[in-house]
Image (cartoon, grey):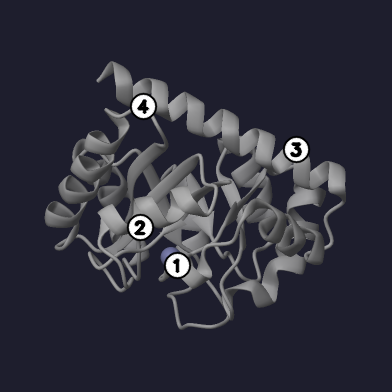
Amino acid sequence: MIDFHTHTTLSDGELIPAEQIRRAEVRGYRMLGISDHADLGTMTSIIPMVVEAARRENELGRMKVFGGVELTYVRPVHIAEFVGRARELGAAVVIAHGETIAEPVEPGTNRTAIEAGVDILAHPGLLSLDDARLAARRGVLLEISGKAGHSLCNGHVAQIARAAGAKLIFGSDAHNPAQMPDRAQAERICRGAGLSDEEVQAMFANAEQFGRRIYESIAKS
Ligand SMILES: [Zn+2]
Ligand SMILES: [Zn+2]
């Protein structure tokens, strides 16, 4: 299983990173992202902690763990600054908490996050075709969400991404171990969004490639 979008007690998840990593390993994960919610103030403490948890685990050569961040409710006007600062702090994966229909995220968040070059736009809700086209050009991955509420728009996201030629990625958005799916369940969620089996396999192959690329860049730094 490959999943870059999970939360720990460093934001509103239930497990500390060490337990999250072990629970994911038991669930069959090969690549795990810990991408806690953060804003401009809290990221300076959260990112170094998840990066260190990932670094120590990666020394063991078992799973590949990525210390990332999900910029959450950051005002669009601050998003570009946040993305730059998150990368300076060592975040391996930068995710934006997109404009879900389940929460009042500020309009303009999707567009600004894509323009700022996040790696993944999570649960982008009623994403526009224009924004999906920009995501395709910028190489921003659009998320099919495993989380209740956010997943209400999965079908729309799948359809718009296909029309725009944008790449998709699965993200569990797990806040506890019961929300971490195994690969078969994650594939079922993607199929439920209207994707064909080939599209789902391509999505996971792309996720693996993305993970390998960032893992190599972490190993070099
Ligand atoms: Zn989110
Ligand atoms: Zn999340």
Earlier-in-chain disc, 3 versus 2: 2
Separation of marks 1 and 3 at Cα, in angstroms: 26 Å
Is residue 114 something one can see in this rendering?
no
The residue pinned by badge 4 equals: 61
Residue depicted at 40% across the width and 27% down the height: 215
Q: Amino acid at mark 3?
A: Ala
Secondary structure of residue under mark 3: helix
Q: 124 or 189, which lies in front?
A: 189
Q: Quadrant of residue 15?
A: bottom left
Is label 3 within 8 A of ligand 2 (CB to nearest ligand atom)? no
Q: What's the distance in space between the residues labelled 3 and 2, CA to CA?
A: 27 Å
Q: Which residue is mark 1?
A: 177
Q: Which residue is mark 2?
A: 20
- The quadrant where residue 16 appears: bottom left
Q: Secondary structure at mark 4?
A: loop
Q: Please report whichever mark, 4 or 3, sits nearer to the chain's N-terminal start.
A: 4
First of labels 2, 1 by sequence position = 2
Residue 63: percent from left, percent from top = 42, 36
Residue ID at (41%, 71%): 176
Q: Quadrant of the C terminus?
A: top left
Pointers 2 and 1 in contact (CB under 8 A)?
yes
Characterize the local packing of mark 4: few (<14), some (14-19) or many (20 or more) Cα atoms within 10 angstroms: few
Q: Is residue 154 above or below residue 201?
A: below
The picture quadrant for ligand 1 comes to bottom left
Res 202 label: 3
Q: Confirm if mark 1 falls within 8 A of ligand 2.
A: no
- For the residues labelled 4 and 3, the Cα–Cα distance comes to 26 Å
Q: Earlier in the sequence, mark 2 or mark 4?
A: 2
Residue type at tag 2 = Gln
Q: Earlier in the sequence, mark 1 or mark 4?
A: 4
Q: Residue at x 32, y 26 (%)?
A: 218
